[in-house]
Image (spheres, rainbow, N blue to C red):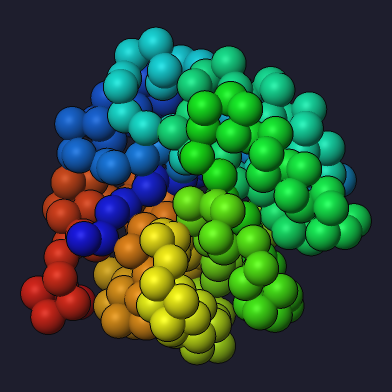
Amino acid sequence: MVEVSTSILSVKKGEESKTFFALEASKTDYFHIDVMDGEFVEKNTYQTMLEYASYIRRISNAPLDVHLMVNDIKKAVDDYSAVEPNIITFHLEACKNEEEVFEMINYIKQYNCKVGISVKPNTKIEEVYKYLPYIHMCLVMTVEPGKGGQSYLSEMTEKVRTLKSYIDDNHLEVDIEVDGGINLRTAPEVKKAGANILVAGTAILNAVDYKVIIDELKCPIGDVSV
């Protein structure tokens, strides 16, 4: 079953409350919280996303999917644990070595939270294999992290397919999430490759009816109208 995690990065100022209520009514599976520190990536959304996540938690029971694009993972985990996220994902590239990766996995689990690891487009997917038995999700970035509204990098489809084959061959239970340039045109491609959680932001938020887009993104491959 395919799920949709709606990125709130592009929510219009002054329309936050209306948008969050509408997204929940439209049955988004997750609110995707893009946390950027201005160091790991150029943009800084740290405080804004914390405010948005706190507000969503007060008005909604929908799961929060927190994506940390930060250098100081431990501090961000401490800060965002207050909003009781369903899953916290950190970047493999933010860790100095294997020991630190495992330290972060265990640190997140202490908060009774699922763990995800994300990889940038230029990171070989094989680098995440050793961690898969210990995490719940692998997030494949299908654009360079740090900006909303970018176009999907088509070469990432093979990366998703390779990851899916490894997960199946090794009988692992790990979700594959894709983030970047996901819309009704690119969704069938990544779903066919094996992704089962789609992060979409502008494709949903720019639509007249959120539910129509969310429903179509969730559709089985043969049923998606593009």
In the foreground, 187 or 103: 103
Query: Going 39% across and 77% down the picture, which residue do you hit?
Result: 168
Q: What is the x, y in percent for residue 53?
A: 50, 24
Q: What is the x, y in percent for residue 187?
A: 32, 72
In the foreground, 153 or 194: 194
Query: Going 43% across and 66% down the picture, which residue do you hit?
Result: 172
Query: Going 76% across and 52% down the picture, which residue do you hit?
Result: 101
- Left or right: residue 212 versus residue 57 is left
Q: In this view, does 73 lie above or below 75?
A: below
Q: Is residue 111 above or below residue 204?
A: above
The single residue placed furthest to the top in the displayed view is: 58
In the foreground, 111 or 169: 169
- Left or right: residue 190 versus residue 130 is left
Q: What is the x, y in percent for residue 223?
A: 9, 74
Q: What is the x, y in percent for residue 79?
A: 69, 21
Query: Going 58% across and 25% down the picture, which residue do you hit?
Result: 111
The single residue placed furthest to the left in the displayed view is: 223
- Can residue 144 be seen here? no
Could you say which quadrant of the image residue 110 lies in?
top right
- Can residue 173 be seen here? yes
Q: Quadrant of the C terminus?
A: bottom left
